[in-house]
Image (spheres, grey):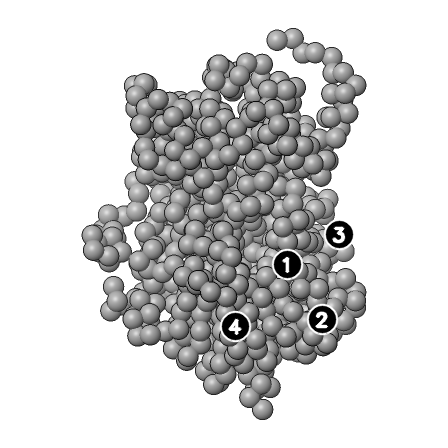
Amino acid sequence: MSITDRIARGLESGWKVTDGATLTANQTHEVDVVVIGTGAGGGTTAEILARSGLSVILVEEGRLYYQKDFKMNELDAYASLYQEGMSRVTKDGAISILQGRCVGGSTTVNWTSSFRTPEPTLNWWGSRFGLADLSPDAMKPWFDGREERHNIEPWKAAPNQNNDILRQGCEKLGWSWQIIPRNVKGCWNLGYCGVGCPTNAKQGALTTTIPGALDNDATLFHGLRADKLVVKQDRIDHLKASAMAADGVTPSGVTVELRARHFVVAASAIGSPGLLLRSDIPDPHDRIGKRTFIHPVNATIAEMPDTVDPYYGAPQSIYSDEFNFTGGVDGPAGFKMEVPPLHPAMSAGVVPGHGEEQKRNLAKLPRMNSVLALMRDGFHPESPGGTVSLRDDCSPVLDYPVTDYLWRGLREAFYKMAEIQFAAGAKKVRLMHLDSPWFSSWSDTRKGIDELAMKIHRVKLFTAHQMGGCGMGHDPSESVVNGFGEHHHLSNLSVHDASIFPTSIGANPQLSVYALAARNSTRLASKLRS
Amino acid sequence: MPERTPSPATMDRRSFLRTGMGGALFLGTVSVTAGLSGCATSPAGQGYATLTGASHSNYQFRFLTLDDIVLFEALLPALVGPTLTEEPDQRRAQIGDTIERIDAGIHQFGPANQKELRGLFDLLNFSVTRVTVARVWSSWANASSADVDAFLNRWRTSSIGLFNNGYIALTKVSNVAFYGHEDHWPVSGYPGPPQWAVDALPQFKANA
């Protein structure tokens, strides 16, 4: 394994990597830049800064897992690689939050879909938030560069059956569909992206920018939780962090103090506002944690006449934007349609039911297809997003009220997804809704959707994309950072992750994070070098 | 059991439970009360063996209490029972293994969600709230599969979001721990990771 595995080889060659669980004494370290978070934003930032010759410490709350640990096993992966052991939900429990918590962050467990930020989104940011510097033309070289770095290109192999059902349905209905660009190199087409790529084919942070940073002398602490940035006058003085025990969830009692000239926060749209709130960062307009977006997801499942094997093959290779921007960028809630992979633990957890009913549901798995819709939230006045706040124990929690505007979009998406599945030959379709039966025809389904309550705790809702909460903008009264991710008030603080998006993206966000982090880190490196 | 006319006190509690915050506070109160009234409140450790009188395994419980184990022994036959084998010893072992995996999963949930689940399990274990809120009249050890199924359906169809959440929480942790495990993949027809890939990858080699 050491011959082919980038991490194993690097560790053998003497990378500076410390597992917080092995620390026995409190300690202090000092570097040029401390980067908090190792996902799409943190990894990109650390590599660019380290390559420019700056000394960098990367801090990751989760643990380092790599090829030796990736055994295509759902239960192990959900417990170790995801936030709160895959039990993270919004404050009222209505929306399940899928989010990585490991070195590489969500890029270690995502399904590899890699889209440029849609042009209407960038143009909207320009006109609405004073971010004209992020125009599609200005961003093009950054997307080009990151597509090369992460080997992003449209999937060349045939889509698996699960994805092909989305293609066939759209084709029959005359709706547009496209091939998804993926960040993979030498992909075996197995279908286990969500539980840690077993072949190192996925070109997420774990196999690209993190090794790139460590090769350039950066230091990585994993199993180390960033507790608080300590402010002195108009600067961050140091970061206080707590080492976690080997179980990854219990603080060991050992603390680490990290001093630096500059601090980059890239701890996700829930983690970054959480850290800033814990740190009492100046926030005169009460913006930290506000306007948090999640691409609320609803889904339908179909029983197909033939084998689908929805657990095998590249999990996402086809999408449809037929209803994404067609109502105008700030019109009725638009949505992107994709399919999720279906493995048994995930399916048993998201398909509601118990007893004999659930046994019959799950027995359909080999012939099951699912379509999901990602609501494009944050573009309309009736879609103001959610709010991140701190619980009693200072951990962050997201409150996300689902507005009537979004319910209209979710209902519309139910119609379209079911119509696609029947058009592709489904025998039966069921909504991910507590009260949905299995419908046997499109007309019955349409009537059913007319009548089913669109309410929290009835509709099963999910999010795999967390954005906003430290929004960027020209005007400090409605944003936390400027268009370069620089904090409006503290001169040595930047935010380099999806939390700076002023709206959702309208597409899977990883490439948007890579590109913005690359642009902003390149500027930061030249500022710190001069 | 005939539907009783709700007393004013019950009505107050119901409207109280409708708000998420009220629900959280209420569950917190139950946890305290449950502790004072003799419910088991510490993790069961190796208690499974103690409880069943059989040496099931050496698994060390880190979250579930002895009362929680009894609760899940009652819930699982209704939650996943139709897929369990009939043979009594094997059936007991399948239930025991699943409860251990539920405990292992919850350990990774972290403090905030553990607190929520503690409240839920205490509410179900504490006899007063078991009867008044869950409306299960006999102790869990004596509850029939039909009693449990009726309880689950009440919470599933309830107009009170907190109970829907309780239903989702109980079914999710149980369904994931059961259907997600290799032993039960045949129930869903999932063949497991492709054997050719397992054979080719270094992490599956004995010395990896």
Element marked by disc 3: loop
Q: Which residue is mark 4?
A: A28
Residue A350 lies, with reference to residue B138, above or below; the image says below
Numbered tag placed on residue A473 in the rendering: 2
Quarter of the image for the N terminus of chain A: give it. bottom left
The answer to whether the residue labelled 4 contacts the one labelled 1, judged by CB atoms less than 8 Å apart, is: no
- The answer to which image quadrant residue A155 occupies is bottom left
Residue at the image point whose x is 71% and y is 58% from the top: A290
Say which chain tag 3 marks.
A
Element marked by disc 4: strand
Q: Nearer the viewer, residue A14 or A82?
A: A14
First along the sequence among labels 2 and 1: 1
Quarter of the image for the C terminus of chain A: give it. bottom right
Say which chain tag 4 marks.
A
Q: Nearer the viewer, residue A247 or B97?
A: A247
Amino acid type, label 1 = Gly
Q: Nearer the viewer, mark 2 or mark 4?
A: 4
Q: Nearer the viewer, mark 4 or mark 1?
A: 4
Q: Residue furthest bottom?
A: A530
Q: Which residue is mark 3?
A: A382
Q: Position of residue B81 (x, y in %)?
A: 41, 23
First along the sequence among labels 4 and 1: 4
Circle 1 Cα neighbour tier, 10 Å, few/some/many (<14 / 14–19 / ≥20): many
